[in-house]
Amino acid sequence: MLSVSRHYFIINEKLQMRNYLRAYKLSSVAYFLIFIASVIPIPDYEPLHNFNLLDKWVHFVMYGALSLCVWWDIYHVRRTQEFGPKDLKRTTFYPIFFGGLMEVIQRYCTFGVRSGDLIDFVANCIGVVLGFLIGFFILRKLYA
C-alpha cells in the first residue's frame, strides 16, 4: 500500500506532466509525429531514388523544425526574451538526444524494417543547430 506522501508525489508528478504537455503543445506534437515517422515502415517509391541524400534532407528539416517548435513554445509560454541554461537544454540537447534515441530504436527495435544510421544522426544534429540559431536570432527578434 502506498503511503500518503508517496501517493501525493505520484499525483503531483502526473499533474506536472499534464501541465507541461498543455503548455508545450506544438513541441509535444512534433516529438510525437517524429517518433511515429521514425518507427513506421516507409514504402519504397521509385521516383524518389533520383534525389541524392533525400533521406538526410528529411532528417535535417524534421529536427530543425522540432527545435523551432520548442523555441516557439518557450516564447509563447513565457512571453519573454530571456534565455537560460534550461532553454539551451530544451532547444538543443533534448532534440539531439531524441534524434540519437530514434536512430538506436530504428536500428535495434524495428526488426529490420528501418535502419539506424550515423549520417542520419549527423543530419539530425545539423538540423537542430540550425533550428536553434533561427530560434535564437530570428524568433527572439519577433518577440522583442
Image: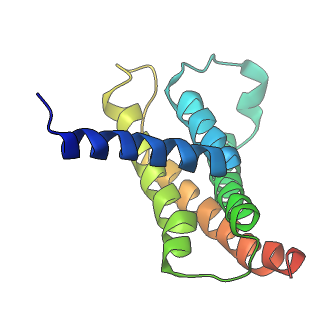
The residue closer to the viewer here, 43 or 92, is 92
Q: Is residue 42 above or below residue 13?
A: above
The residue closer to the viewer here, 59 or 76, is 76
Which colour assignment does the render follow? rainbow
Residue at 60% x, 21% y: name it: 42
For the N terminus, which image quadrant?
top left
The residue closer to the viewer here, 19 or 65, is 19
Residue 34: x %, y % from top left: 59, 38
Drawn side of residue 5 relative to residue 107, left or right? left
Q: Quadrant of residue 74?
A: bottom right
For the C terminus, which image quadrant?
bottom right
Residue 40: x %, y % from top left: 54, 21
Residue 95: x %, y % from top left: 52, 56
Q: Is residue 24 in view from this perspective?
A: no
Residue at 73% x, 20% y: name it: 46
Drawn side of residue 77 relative to residue 102, left or right? right
Residue at 55% x, 82% y: name it: 84
Q: Is residue 140 in view from this perspective?
A: yes
